[in-house]
Image (cartoon, coloured by chain):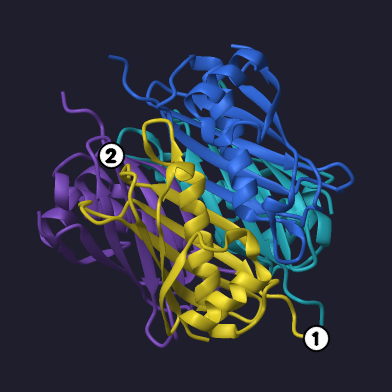
Chain colours: A cyan, B purple, C yellow, D blue
Amino acid sequence: MGPEELTEFLDDVFPQIKGQMLIEAVGPMSARLRMPVGEQHLRPGGTVSGPSMFTLADCAFYVAILAQIGREALTVTTSATINFLRKPAAADLVCEARILKLGRALVVGDATILQEGQSGPVAHATMTYSIPPRR
Amino acid sequence: MGPEELTEFLDDVFPQIKGQMLIEAVGPMSARLRMPVGEQHLRPGGTVSGPSMFTLADCAFYVAILAQIGREALTVTTSATINFLRKPAAADLVCEARILKLGRALVVGDATILQEGQSGPVAHATMTYSIPPRR
Amino acid sequence: MGPEELTEFLDDVFPQIKGQMLIEAVGPMSARLRMPVGEQHLRPGGTVSGPSMFTLADCAFYVAILAQIGREALTVTTSATINFLRKPAAADLVCEARILKLGRALVVGDATILQEGQSGPVAHATMTYSIPPRR
Amino acid sequence: MGPEELTEFLDDVFPQIKGQMLIEAVGPMSARLRMPVGEQHLRPGGTVSGPSMFTLADCAFYVAILAQIGREALTVTTSATINFLRKPAAADLVCEARILKLGRALVVGDATILQEGQSGPVAHATMTYSIPPRR
């Protein structure tokens, strides 16, 4: 699936995040998403909240997996570790997700969150997803 | 600060989460929060989304810290690891946060998310927060 | 299996760690191990090295699982997160491992490392193990 | 500091790991180490043990930091997350450590463990180190 087909699929099965993120690119074992940051994503200090960045990383990795394995909406996160590295400004964030291991039952990879004008990544996450067994 | 004072403080400095979580109890080095789960917290499969549970764990730990150190809104998460253990139903979640180490600059602890009717915790997180230096 | 039977089993299948740790107790979904600390466990600063504490946490959780599921030596760690909380002295460490979720394929839990004379835990780990499928 | 100077420094301040790992290269914000795998690194199943890989990742990241900041032996790990992706054979492992954020007090980065003949990384870790304050 490409960005458009993935966007349609997500809008259908996961309406809760509709319009919150743009799928910019998908490649072999990777995906890039953009999150336009608004007032609702901020936390005290005027910076983007941790949960907003977690949501972006989680979705980007979900998209990278779906692009590989197809319409498996029930693929779920089993664990995630996120490090917040630099305080982002209240502006767009871009997330690059990368699959390091695509197993039959588990998928492991990482996601790097970037923002224009920063000297390095603003956050880095490693994530594990579980793929439901084929019927 | 007790639950009421903490709720007022959060409503003031962090209006983005107003009304989303109830501070049920705070104790020495601990806090318990409840999240009434609605349609907006769900993901494909009708279960609570990972980012919703991350948000709950993050806030519960933030509250446990504020209850100890006072009005330091700029205290921020530096890293978090979350394990999703059981698929929760679309119903209330309760989170118990516990501080394991309250240092001058870093606070480390964990948060356990529970749901009535489940045979064990639905998620478990460990978190590190950074406290801004005193002026 | 109890502490003695587990010790014999480990000495047999995992001779690399023989004599390095004492199994003090096993309970339902838990285990407690002691590591007598020697020169070989230290790092610059005269404190116990991170990898030594990781080894202790990993073994304690392995023992807690074996006590539940029996002689499954090929049960392996799939992921672990460890937070180092206080610098331990060059003295015995005790680790308490606890299973939070015993699934068919994955086991998740945590391990807390303690040392007499410290004001709180010296390290805390969360771990996931994979159980090989039954033949 | 380059590989030879770093090796000498480590042999001096951290004799416990002397001869266990070879510093192959250091670059800006990065380091590559090789661990010749022997009987003592194995676990049940004839594969390299998790703690052995943790030790390699931890040392590689330590070396990457020392190469940047100089002779600060008391720089210590504060947290680490490691994912084990593929079972390595009983053969040499290579670890590439990379610094993502070099702050004044905290350094965050990741380490990827590779083995010739494998279809992808055998392990991936993210680590945080604390740098002691300058006197």
Look at 35% across and 24% down and name the residue there. D132
Q: Residues within 10 Å of mark 2 (few under 14, many from 20)?
A: many
- Distance of label 2 from label 1 (alpha carbons): 51 Å
The chain letter for the residue carrying disc 1 is C
For mark 2, give the secondary structure.
Answer: loop
Look at 19% across and 48% down and name the residue there. B66
Judging depth in this view, the residue of D118 and D56 nearest the camera is: D56
For mark 1, give the secondary structure.
Answer: loop
Q: Position of residue C109 (x, y in %)?
A: 48, 69
The answer to which image quadrant residue C106 occupies is bottom right
The chain letter for the residue carrying disc 2 is B
Query: Does the image show residue C18?
Result: yes
Q: Position of residue A80 (x, y in %)?
A: 55, 54
Q: Residues within 10 Å of mark 1 (few under 14, many from 20)?
A: few
Q: Position of residue B35 (x, y in %)?
A: 34, 68
Residue at label 1?
A: C135
Instruction: Identify whether A90 is placed above or below C54.
Output: above
Residue at label 2?
A: B75
Q: Specify whether C79 is left or right of B62.
A: right
Look at 22% across and 61% down and name the residue there. B30
Which amino acid does the dot numbered 1 rest on? Arg
Which amino acid does the dot numbered 2 rest on? Thr
Look at 41% across and 45% down and name the residue there. A40
Q: Position of residue A127 (x, y in %)?
A: 61, 53
